[in-house]
Image (spheres, helix red, strand yellow):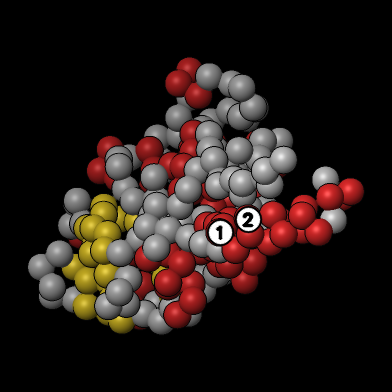
């Protein structure tokens, strides 16, 4: 009997190299994971389908429940992601300690499913920060002064966009008038650039795994 082939993830990570995107400002510190995706939506482990309930308690005026028709729910007209000028935003600007609270991986799933590719903040909760890289999101740490400048620019210029260059490790305005470097771990950078999550990293060695399994079956057929 042939050894089983390792299978890939249902939703492979999209490689991240250079991304230009509209910026949405979430001017709040200490945004926890229950605010990012409330606990009643954690029943699924499919990685997808969480975007409509991102920041659910802030986006809608009623309480959200799994399976509800979000198109029929009343929107909060004052919440930033409901404003027309930020429709289609793919870069989220936030304040300190973003992603604090419980360690649910559904939080980066919801952000990615909504359409965000990168986050910018002065700091993140450690577990959330690690989970972002594992799910194709780039969480950029910039100094408070740079974040303050970006909040001011977003407010002043409708349609404000940023160019995020992961290979060069820079955040820049589209006209190049502001270029800010950022740090990123080399291994995490490699994984993001090549669209590799933990399963993808393992599958790079699929031939070795299959050879090992074939040898094990030949030597110990009673274990099949």
Image side of residue 178 versus residue 50, left or right: left
Where residue 85 appears, x then y in whole percent? Answer: 25, 43
Image side of residue 151 versus residue 179, left or right: right
Task: Report if the CB atoms under discs 2 and 1 are less than 8 Å apart.
Answer: yes
Seen at 50% across and 24% down, the residue is 70
Image side of residue 6 versus residue 179, left or right: right
Quadrant, the N terminus = top right
Q: Which residue is mark 2?
A: 210
Q: Nearer the viewer, residue 206 or 3?
A: 3
- Residue 154 can be seen, yes or no: no
Which labelled disc corresponds to residue 207? Answer: 1
Q: Is residue 149 above or below residue 77?
A: below
- Residue 161 can be seen, yes or no: yes
Where residue 64 appears, x then y in whole percent? Answer: 61, 29
Q: Quadrant of residue 163?
A: bottom left
Q: Is residue 72 above or below residue 162?
A: above
Q: Secondary structure at mark 1?
A: helix
Seen at 39% across and 45% down, the residue is 115
- Circle 1 packing at 10 Å, graded few (<14), some (14-19), many (20+), is few
Q: Most extreme residue toward the left, as rendered?
A: 175
Where residue 197 appears, x then y in whole percent? Answer: 53, 59
């Amino acid at each position: 009997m042939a050894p089983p082939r390792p299978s890939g993830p249902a939703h492979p990570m999209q490689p991240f190299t250079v991304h230009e995107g509209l910026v949405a400002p979430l001017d709040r510190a200490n945004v926890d994971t229950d605010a990012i995706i409330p606990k009643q939506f954690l029943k699924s482990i499919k990685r997808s389908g969480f975007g409509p309930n991102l920041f659910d308690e802030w986006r809608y005026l009623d309480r959200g429940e799994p399976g509800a028709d979000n198109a029929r729910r009343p929107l909060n007209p004052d919440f930033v992601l409901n404003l027309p000028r930020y429709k289609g935003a793919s870069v989220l600007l936030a304040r300190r300690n973003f992603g604090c609270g419980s360690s649910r991986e559904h939080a980066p799933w919801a952000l990615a499913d909504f359409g965000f590719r990168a986050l910018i903040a002065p700091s993140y909760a450690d577990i959330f920060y690690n989970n972002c890289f594992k799910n194709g999101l780039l969480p950029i740490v910039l100094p408070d002064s740079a974040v303050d400048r970006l909040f001011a620019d977003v407010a002043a210029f409708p349609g404000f966009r940023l160019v995020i260059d992961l290979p060069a490790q820079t955040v820049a305005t589209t006209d190049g008038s502001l270029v800010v470097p950022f740090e990123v771990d080399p291994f995490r950078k490699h994984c993001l650039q090549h669209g590799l999550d933990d399963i993808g990293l393992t599958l790079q060695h699929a031939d070795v795994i299959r050879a090992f399994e074939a040898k094990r079956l030949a030597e110990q057929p009673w274990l099949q």
